[in-house]
Image (spheres, helix red, strand yellow):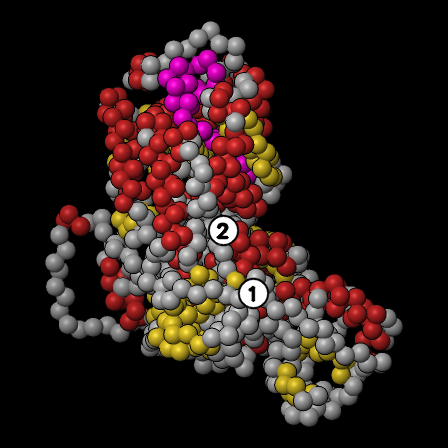
């Protein structure tokens, strides 16, 4: 069977392989493709070799991974197109900006972008990319040469080189002379964290819209320079699964157009035609939906393209493995299947190139003239300028236009109350008028309630940016514009005092943690106000930081010079105070202004810990805080030294009870442990942890079992919560909540909730009306009511922080970062 595949492909695509000057991947690498895994540097070397020998191939280097591996794409087309490539790119870009009135679409080729290996251990993809580019090289495949006359192909051979190398290096280190085809052999089981994620253990296929990772930012920036008509994301799934290609499963977002749906069917039928001829198994219209906006298929769809995912069975298959039906699946098989869909899709794009370009132009013209959705303008209030600026950066990265301010009263849907009310537009409020080319993506990112037709969705079902950024917002049915391009310039009202008593700093942004870190690194003592106070007629909220001159001058005679330098460096106001006497509140000698200790933070890594949760914390400390983080394994928990570690983070995961019991003495002496999500379950019943899961009330009525066999693969919708937003009521007087006020919106992906702490602080609770948006079944909504999600329990001289909810979810849940820095730096 395996020997027939290549001959079939030759017949299938009418290969006319000329005695070409160009080397095949086999000849270049020195081994038949599929007999071993190719290192990333060799893949790049082959791409560079082809680009050096073929003037119709252009290589673009677009960035580096976190581990400094080069990211490249190859652009290939006909000689005529390549000679006019830059103008064709600009023409296509003009269409995406609804500015293509002068573009002759009869002469405009369609752009097909092929993305390989976004998940590092789905390793057949990058091998396929070499074979694909070879087939498009001059003099190799005559039919492909015809297709390239009206098509430009962009090939990214490896979106995630760090993850791929992690997988390949492991496999090569354990593989024998011959592949061990037994599914039980060790070469089919990767160690933690596996090769799927990138360096920081992020899933890059869920990062397209958020662009939290360096690889994604670089790739999406390049993507927006080309804006292809079709984007294919090549993946692998369980090796016992047949091949998947479009059309996709429900739910499909309502803003995806009729043509985008139709073309998925057109492409799918052409793929099926070739698979049927060879008897290869496949499935469509199942499992892989089109809802969550940050995938490699949905993000292009919301940007006017045809986005499709192709999934080959193969995760963990190594070079060969026996699958459930008794056949042996090889790497060569996987490469050939991916090559087939790649070439078949190129054929489909070429056959439909004119219509693709015409529909692409129409998409953006309609998006700019007739925005989708119920609301035509979104207004985001300037509750927090730091988070507002970060939202502006995100919108800019996604080509979404916005402005600021106005002087008008509007009627709009209030995201917080879910009621239509009158509101006033302020000077620094952000106004997103959807009458723009990016209106579809903007609407998807802002809409308060996403229509979901099937609870069996593959990912979260709620992500509206006002909730993620915890900013008040309104959806308006009217179109109107902001009046200013930027936020109002900040007025310099700094007061200069000679020999002040001290300085006051506000704490309401994640960036304030960087100021505190800098002060601590300079050995400057910093205090926190546990209560509000008034100085100079101005109210300073609880959570304000204070630096006293006299207590710091003993060690630092240049304290005033340092404060001025930090103020300029961080553009942070240090408000001088002339006296310890406070007009309202406690004087500065009071115990309500305690010193903040310097956090010495350790985090646990290991096999039973969520690599995603671990990676989110790791990335946050290194890339956003630039703060040292010690990483240990679980078996070393019992060796913690309070002098070296006073904060211990346990990411989401399962921990051995014997290790949790070892924490009691360390906590009682002054340590702080932060338990994230399922880590809480590991300490139930262990001293000194006073936490108890809230159990649902058992109903006594008789259950009626009416489930039928054909629905066996469906979730019980009553128990489903793939990702919904809940409103958390905060105790704003606690340091945990500083910078957010009364309410925090959390993304819940489970139904866990806890009984209120009897000896501690229930700083984040769910009330009866806490559900906001997203799929949450009836049973889930009954459970997630009247209980605690976030708590702080004093224990001896230390503290235990319970976080039943992911504050750092995929690094785009910006308001959660505020709570997280509070737990690290303020909660002691």
Name the residue at the front extreme.
102
Q: Which mark is residue 640?
A: none
Where 333 sits versus 491, above or below? above
Magenta region: which residues?
135-164
Image coordinates of residue 198 in percent, x first then y, are: 52, 43
- Residue drawn at x 71%, y 66% is 571
Image coordinates of residue 299 in percent, x first then y, are: 41, 47
Where 67 sits versus 421, above or below? above
Q: Which residue is mark 2?
A: 398
Image coordinates of residue 426 in percent, x first then y, are: 52, 74
Q: Specify whether 26 is left or right of 411.
A: right
Where 531 sits versus 219, above or below? below
Q: Which mark is residue 484?
A: 1
Mark 2 or mark 1, whichever is nearer to me: 1
Instruction: Give the Cα separation between the discs numbered 2 and 1.
Output: 20 Å
Q: Specify whether 340 is left or right of 153.
A: left
In the structure shown, which secondary structural element does the residue marked by tag 2 occupy?
loop
- Residue drawn at x 63%, y 59% is 625
- Residue drawn at x 38%, y 41% is 360
- In this rendering, does residue 180 appear at all? no
Q: Specify whether 732 is left or right of 722.
A: right
The image quarter containing residue 2 is: top left
Where 146 sits versus 545, above or below? above
Based on the picture, tell me whether residue 149 belongs to the magenta stretch: yes
């Amino acid at each position: 069977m395996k020997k027939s595949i290549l001959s079939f492909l030759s017949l299938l695509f009418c290969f006319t392989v000329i005695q070409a000057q160009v080397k095949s991947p086999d000849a270049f690498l020195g081994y038949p493709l599929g007999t071993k895994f190719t290192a990333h540097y060799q893949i790049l070397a082959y791409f560079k070799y082809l680009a050096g020998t073929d003037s119709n191939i252009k290589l673009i280097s677009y960035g580096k991974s976190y581990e400094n591996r080069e990211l490249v794409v190859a652009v290939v087309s006909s000689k005529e197109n390549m000679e006019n490539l830059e103008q064709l790119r600009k023409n296509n870009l003009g269409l995406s900006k609804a500015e293509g009135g002068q573009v002759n679409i009869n002469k405009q080729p369609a752009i097909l972008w092929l993305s390989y290996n976004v998940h590092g251990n789905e390793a057949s993809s990058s091998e396929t990319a070499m074979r694909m580019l070879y087939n498009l090289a001059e003099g190799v495949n005559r039919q492909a040469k015809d297709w390239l006359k009206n098509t430009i192909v962009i090939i990214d051979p490896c979106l995630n080189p760090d993850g791929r190398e992690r997988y390949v290096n492991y496999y090569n280190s354990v593989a024998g002379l011959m592949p061990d085809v037994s599914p039980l052999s060790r070469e089919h089981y990767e160690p933690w964290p596996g090769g799927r994620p990138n360096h920081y253990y992020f899933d890059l296929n869920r990062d397209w819209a958020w662009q939290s990772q360096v690889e994604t930012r670089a790739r999406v920036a390049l993507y927006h320079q080309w804006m292809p008509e079709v984007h294919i994301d090549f993946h692998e799934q369980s090796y016992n699964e047949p091949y998947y290609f479009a059309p996709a499963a429900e739910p499909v977002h309502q803003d995806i157009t009729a043509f985008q749906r139709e073309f998925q069917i057109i492409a799918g039928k052409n793929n099926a035609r070739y698979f049927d001829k060879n008897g290869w198994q496949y499935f469509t219209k199942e499992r892989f939906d089109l809802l969550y906006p940050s995938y490699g298929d949905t993000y292009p769809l919301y940007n006017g393209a045809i986005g499709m995912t192709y999934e080959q069975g193969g995760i963990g298959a190594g070079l060969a493995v026996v699958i459930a039906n008794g056949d042996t699946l090889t790497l060569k098989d996987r490469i050939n299947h991916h090559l087939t869909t790649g070439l078949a899709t190129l054929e489909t794009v070429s056959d439909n190139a004119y219509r693709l370009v015409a529909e692409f132009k129409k998409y953006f013209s309609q998006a700019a003239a007739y925005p989708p959705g119920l609301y035509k303008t979104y207004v985001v209030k300037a509750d927090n300028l730091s988070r507002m600026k970060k939202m502006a950066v995100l919108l800019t990265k996604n080509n979404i236009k916005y402005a600021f301010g106005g002087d008008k009263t509007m009627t709009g849907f209030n995201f917080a109350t879910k009621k239509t009310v009158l509101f006033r537009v302020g000077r620094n409020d952000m106004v997103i008028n959807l009458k723009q080319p990016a209106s579809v993506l903007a609407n998807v990112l802002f809409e308060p309630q996403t229509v979901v037709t099937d609870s069996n969705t593959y990912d979260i079902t709620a992500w509206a940016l006002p909730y993620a950024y915890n900013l008040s917002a309104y959806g308006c049915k009217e179109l109107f514009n902001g009046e200013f391009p930027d936020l109002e310039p900040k007025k310099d009202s700094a007061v200069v005092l000679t020999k002040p008593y001290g300085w006051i700093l506000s704490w309401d942004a994640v960036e304030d943690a960087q100021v505190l870190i800098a002060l601590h690194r300079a050995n400057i003592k910093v205090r926190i106000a546990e209560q509000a106070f008034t100085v100079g007629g101005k109210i300073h909220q609880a959570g304000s930081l204070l630096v006293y001159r006299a207590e710091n001058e003993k060690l630092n005679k240049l304290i005033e010079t340092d404060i001025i330098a930090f103020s300029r460096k961080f553009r942070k106001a240090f408000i001088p105070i002339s006296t310890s006497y406070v007009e309202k509140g406690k004087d500065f000698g009071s115990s309500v202004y305690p010193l903040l200790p310097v956090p010495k933070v350790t985090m646990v890594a290991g096999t039973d810990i969520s690599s995603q949760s671990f990676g989110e914390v790791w990335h946050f400390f290194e890339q956003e805080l630039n703060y040292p983080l010690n990483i240990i394994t679980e078996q070393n928990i019992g060796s913690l030294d309070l002098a070296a570690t006073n904060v211990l983070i346990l990411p989401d995961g399962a921990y051995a009870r014997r290790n949790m019991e070892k924490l009691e003495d360390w906590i009682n002496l002054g340590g702080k442990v932060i338990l994230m999500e399922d880590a809480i379950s590991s300490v139930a019943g262990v001293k000194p942890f006073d936490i108890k899961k809230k159990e649902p009330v058992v109903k006594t009525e008789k259950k009626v079992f009416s489930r039928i066999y054909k629905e066996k693969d469906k979730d019980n919708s009553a128990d489903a919560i793939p990702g919904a937003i809940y409103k958390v009521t905060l105790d704003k007087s606690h340091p945990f909540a500083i910078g957010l006020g009364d309410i925090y919106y959390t993304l819940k992906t489970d139904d866990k909730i806890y009984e209120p702490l009897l000896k501690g602080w229930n700083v984040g609770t769910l009330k009866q009306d806490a559900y906001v948006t997203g799929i949450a079944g009836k049973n889930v909504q009954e459970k997630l009511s009247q209980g605690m999600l976030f708590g702080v329990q004093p224990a001896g001289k230390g503290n235990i922080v319970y976080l039943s909810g992911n504050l750092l979810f995929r690094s785009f849940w910006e308001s959660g970062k505020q709570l997280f820095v509070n737990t690290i730096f303020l909660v002691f």
